[in-house]
Amino acid sequence: MSRSEWFDGPTGPGDGTPRAEGGDGPRGPARPTARRRRGPLGTTLVVLAGLALLGGLAADVLTDVWWYESVGFRGVFVKELTTKVLIFVIAAVVTGGAVAASLVAAYRTRPFYVPTTPAQQVLEQYRQAIEPLRRLAVIAVPVVLGLLAGSGSLGAWRTVLLWANREPFGVTDPQFGLDVGFFVFTLPWLHFLVSFVTVVLALAFVAGAFTHYVYGGLQLPGRGPTTRAAYVHLGVIGALIALTRAASYWLDRYSLSTQRGDLLTGITYTDDNAVLPTKAILAVAAIMCAGFFLAAIWSRSWRLPITGVALLVVTAVLVGGAYPALIQSLKVNPSEKSLEAEYIGRNITATGAAFGLDRVKRIQNPPPPVEVDKASERKDAAGIPGVRVIDPNVVAPSFRQLEGQRDYYAFPDTLDVDRYQVGGQTRDAVVAVREINLDGLPDNQRNWLNDHTIYTHGYGFYAAYGNQRTSEGDPVFFEGGSNSSLGEYEKRIYFGELSPSYSVVGAPAAAQPREFDFPASGEGDVAVNNTYSGKGGVPIGSMLRRIAYAVKYREANFLLSDAVNSSSRVLDHRTPTERVERVAPWLRLDGNVYPAVVEGRVQWIVDGFTTSASYPNSRLLEMADATSDAVTTRSNVVTVGTGQVNYIRNAVKATVDAYDGSVKLYGWDTTDPMLKAWGNAFPGSVRPISEISGDLMSHIRYPQDLLKVQRELLTEYHVTNPGDFYSGSDKWRVPRDPSIPAQDQAVVFQSIAMPGEGAAAFSITTSFVPASNNEAGREILRGLLAVDADAGNEAGKPGEGYGTLRLLEYNPETRQPGPGQVLNQIQNSTARSQNPTEPLNLAQYITNNSGSGKQLTFGNLLAFPLQGRMFYVQPLYVQASAGSGSFPQNKVTVAVYGTNVAWGDTLEQAINGLFGEGGEEPPTDPGEPTDPGTPSGTVAQQLAAALEEIQAAYTDGQDALKKGDFAAYGQAQDRLDAAIKKANGLAGQLGTPAPSPSPSPSSSASPSPSPSPTG
């Protein structure tokens, strides 16, 4: 048989081609069958589909390039895209080339003469079926496999960049004596490389073996000889696969340092004394197996390779599995505590270094004084600065009802806590921005123009005192609406957590403004409009850009609407989290971003983490378990982290401007080797910490997710003695939240001073109770963790104490009540309110307001150490359980000290109930706003002041009515109503008749004022 016959198949007489019955007989030659011509429709549809796919891909790439240019991070996009393309091309070419080479080599070395056997007769039929498609298969199969391999390798771009830009940690692993950077940067890259090469070789082996078998070069045992070419081809590839297995076994030795076991993460006694040697033995066995594959070339038999593979499998099972299991059960388990002590110590040290637990400052709770001094206790309790009775996780509906103004405005479900200088003093504040809410528009107003060109942004930054409430229990705002204590700043929110997916903004200077700004307050006007004048977003004045965005968003109005003009810009990717993720794809972000007024702009502050799951011997933690709590369950903006980590650093503080969307990344933990590596990979993307202004520094706080991770670990790693750690007799847990018992209690921002500290510091806190196997376990307080969250206000330099973890530890013999016990005390307390007009005791009050059309909510439970005991404060909120206008109001505040419970309308009353009334009233700071909910002076003096407020509000209302200023008139009426209610309550306490309100003008003379524009 000639080569032409082998490649092209038999031709001429007897070639087996079927012919029409009768041949050239009487019926004559067979008529050729007319072939149907394929119509152009199918081809046209295929071409159009391909063009649409390419057009969509081009539009996505172009718009991404323009977006990155608009925020000044084009280099990040180019570097990421280039790295991905390079990895894809290399992986695809290597995989496709190896498979193609194997196919071609096997085909070209096929035997010319195949023995005639029943098996070969069957294969001959397959060969005849394959032959017409052979050339196409030799191209298509490698291409498809190459594309799959390239796509599957794209996820390794971070691994590749970290390895290429690696930095030393300066910490040596105790087992192998290698720098930790080898495990974090190099080992993941080597694992990827070995795995990729193994897959490529396996595909090449299968492709070669299949071709050799089909074309007769590879015979099954007993069915004929295998060609020498097949032995060489498959023997070499098999040897290479065995060598990759040897490399994999050797790398597995290092991977034991991050292996998670039942006792700890990292190398254990069994790993050190049994698994490590067996991994080395298996690596040697795999090298021997490679030799057996090569020996098959000369022995002309697969007996040695098959034997070698079988022995490798048996060795892996017996030596790699059974032997370590025997060591563990027969030697380690009976003496595990002593044998594992060294390895537990390594785990404790590594975990502390990887998660920052080595910064914990331990404080022992002092014993309570033997003699009780009520006056001293009251002084200390009253001296706690800014006890926050406004819970940011509860009062979001209050913000909506009081300041939302229209249904198309929205506040997030969870608000934020920050600090501001008001009246010359630093105040803890509950803050939020008022964003646009398209779902609040009526259905008949939902269209492309309204959704994307009219309602484009929110308006207003709102801040309320954390420790003040009105007489009705509402927040007291010092910023937002008619209140302005923060000076002038840009109040428009074009980029926020609730922003629309995209908006088209901007117009020529002479054009009529069309973007809704805020409701108008004058007669005849409905709204005040605005035209965006910022530099954010992507200009879309050119036809090319409009076409690209029309394709990207599948929206023809980019080309048809007159709202899109030469000055238009498109704002997209608008949430702060998404913007930071896009410019820093190597960061893991905190689940809670927060707004702050900084240097005349509203800035979103985002905490970024560098993380790894490859830090040797450090505990491997699931982020979703650690960061989930009661707030993440019910919030529409606070998210839960995902993935496993055993190293984390708050490496970056990022800001996103709410008006122009500009993103800035500031390097925070400058000692972090991972931050240095990413800085090398993306030069110029991270700014130095020296560029952080003093104003921005004053609003930086400790990230919540980092504390959640650290508190999860401290439930076990507060124990540093290996023997005690092993016994687990002092494990802790995070208390459950009273409103969502299945979830952990949320972390709390508050100002707190630990025993021995002179002044309170703005901190983020959490508590611990003993771990229990059931929900009925004893819930006494075992620890209180407070992390200094105040970065100070010095430009470029964090505060000296920032990030200090202070762990207050309680002796279990002191039996300090934990959050669950405190809640039980509150719910069952028969204490009477310090407000004498309240007829119910506390338990009755809670029951009465938990049904019959009312809903009672427990606010954040604040815990403070006070003279050896715990002082707890918890606000209670009441609202109607039904109705669109329902919102929670802080009606009472409860204080608990030891086993004593007291409550009243205000915190001052609750403190009086616990420790008695103080002597002299503390002097009032003239710069401090008066808390309408905190009484000062005697009841008679308070009543006289309320009567003066009534007269002043009435007079102001009459003056405003005469001037036609209906907005001011409405505000005066609100003050009048509040003053009358206050006077009624005070009069009831004195037993005197309630004052009657002054007559007001008739309704015909005073039309309802329009809402005033908010700020």
Image: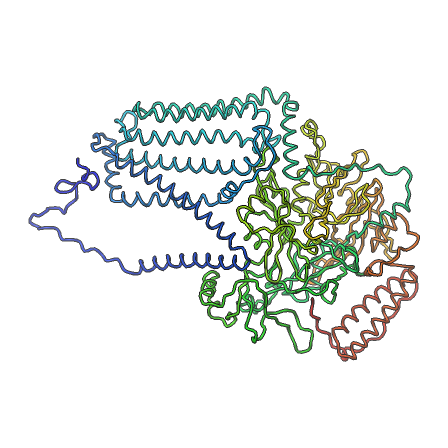
Residue 387's spot in the image, x, y percent? 79, 51
Q: Residue at left 52%, top 29%?
A: 253
Residue 243 is at least partly visible in this image: yes
Q: How was this image coloured?
A: rainbow
Q: Quadrant of residue 291?
A: top left
Residue 456 x/y as whole percent: 58, 65
Residue toward you, 372 or 253: 253
Within the image, what quadrant is residue 717 found in?
top right
Identify the residue at horizontal 20%, vertical 38% (top origin). Answer: 6
Eyeballing the image, is 188 above or below 52?
Answer: above
Image quarter hosting the N terminus:
top left
Q: How many marks?
A: 0
Q: Quadrant of residue 260?
A: top right
Q: Position of residue 89 (x, y in %)?
A: 41, 46
Q: Residue at x 71, y 35 (%)?
A: 718
* Quarter that holds the C terminus: bottom right
Query: Farthest left residue?
Result: 26
Q: Looking at the image, which residue sits at the far top?
A: 330
Is residue 751 placed above or below 205 in the rendered structure? below
Horizontal arrangement in the rendering, residue 131 relative to residue 358 (left or right): left
Position of residue 863 in the picture relative to residue 262 (left or right): right
Whole-percent x, y for residue 983 in the image: 87, 65
